Amino acid sequence: MDSLTQIVLGAAVGEAVLGRRVGNKALLYGAIAGTIPDLDVLVQNFADTITATEAHRGFSHSIIFCVLAAPLLGGLVNKIESKQKLGWKPWAWLFFWCLFTHPLLDCFTTWGTQLFWPFDWRIAFNSIFVIDPLYTIPFMVCVIWAIFLKRSSTLRKKLNWTGIAISSTYLICTVGLKMIATARFEQALENQKIDYNHISTRPGAFSTILWNANVETENAYLLGDYSFFDSQPISFDLYPKNRSAEPEFESPQAREDIERMKDIAQGWYLMENKNGKWYFYDLRFGLRPINQNEKEFVFAYIVKEGDDGLIVNETDKNLEDASLIFKELWERIQGN
């Protein structure tokens, strides 16, 4: 999830663990702990694009990291907050739960979280978008309100747990909404007599009303969307795989690198030669409009063979089209 949401979650968990004993410092250190796993993005400053992408939501989002980091951070904070005279164990307990709930929440999003690292198993329930105001805002209101109450206040405790309960209930509901949306996509495929090998569904941006589907057939991918307010049947856009037209890289390292990219995309990928450049598209995150008549894949990379393997550069994301994106999204959520 986005950084703000993880800060709110971390603060709430910190308050639940130590709020009665240390007051707002529990929220502060909880908020800090909630951001720590996402520091893995700093890897991109020291590694190539493929390695940095593989590292995202890897070790820092694992149970092993939580177990190893919690006592170290607990010991550090115990020295900083020596006047509290808590000892390192209560602080370590706070950090463990704040670190652990971060990847636990991320498991419900699309990218995939290696909770059981070093095992190469990315968990992605695909039930909530990385930014969802319905999850974050009520939760944040409860946490902010609690900050202004005394740590011994019964209302403070109730507010904090109310925020946790509301957000958790909504998170569970997203799984149910996903199941309903998936059933609608499957019914549409059956009605259109489309044979397929696999289907993957995920929520649209900022909402659990609009859902997107990737459907794999033998020779193509089908992309479709569905809003709970739709009145027309679901339609799908077809994108041929064209696997035989993919580039054949000469060096073993380049061939290994492209296979790593395919693994990152979990097999949901296309390659296209456009204007003399090879593009690699990760289909899991769908399309976005770039003008009134054209769309592009959200995650697209320009790839070419270099002296030491594959050179990979993520394409620029033009923020000037943000108004168009939100306009089209809002219109689509309202139904077809």
Image (spheres, rainbow, N blue to C red):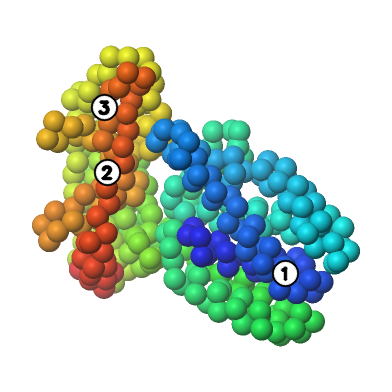
Give the labeled residue for mark 2.
315
Q: What kind of element bears circle 3?
A: strand
Q: Earlier in the sequence, mark 1 or mark 2?
A: 1
Q: CA distance from mark 1 to mark 3?
A: 50 Å
Q: Earlier in the sequence, mark 2 or mark 3?
A: 3
Is the Cβ of the residue at disc 1 closer than 8 Å to that at disc 2? no
Residue 156 in which image quadrant: bottom right
Residues packed near mark 3 inside 10 Å, few (<14), some (14 to 19) or many (20 plus): some
Q: Residue at x 72, y 69 (%)?
A: 25
Residues packed near mark 2 inside 10 Å, few (<14), some (14 to 19) or many (20 plus): few
Tell me the tag on residue 25. Answer: 1
Amino acid type at mark 2: Thr
Residue situated in front as seen by the camera: 277 or 78: 78
Q: Earlier in the sequence, mark 1 or mark 3?
A: 1
Q: Is residue 80 left or right of residue 61?
A: right
Q: Residue at x 45, y 40 (%)?
A: 44
Q: Residue at x 36, y 19 (%)?
A: 308
Residue situated in front as seen by the camera: 233 or 156: 156
* Image location of residue 282, percent across then percent down: 32, 41
Give the labeled residue for mark 3.
304
Q: CA distance from mark 1 to mark 2?
A: 42 Å
Is the Cβ of the residue at disc 2 closer than 8 Å to that at disc 3? no
Q: What kind of element bears circle 2?
A: loop
Q: What kind of element bears circle 1?
A: helix
Amino acid type at mark 1: Lys
Q: Residue at x 49, y 46 (%)?
A: 41
Task: Please determine whether, in this image, residue 209 is positioned above or below residue 77.
Answer: below
* Image location of residue 187, percent across then percent down: 30, 54
- Quadrant where the C terminus sits is bottom left
Residues packed near mark 1 inside 10 Å, few (<14), some (14 to 19) or many (20 plus): some
Residue situated in front as seen by the camera: 224 or 182: 224
Amino acid type at mark 3: Lys
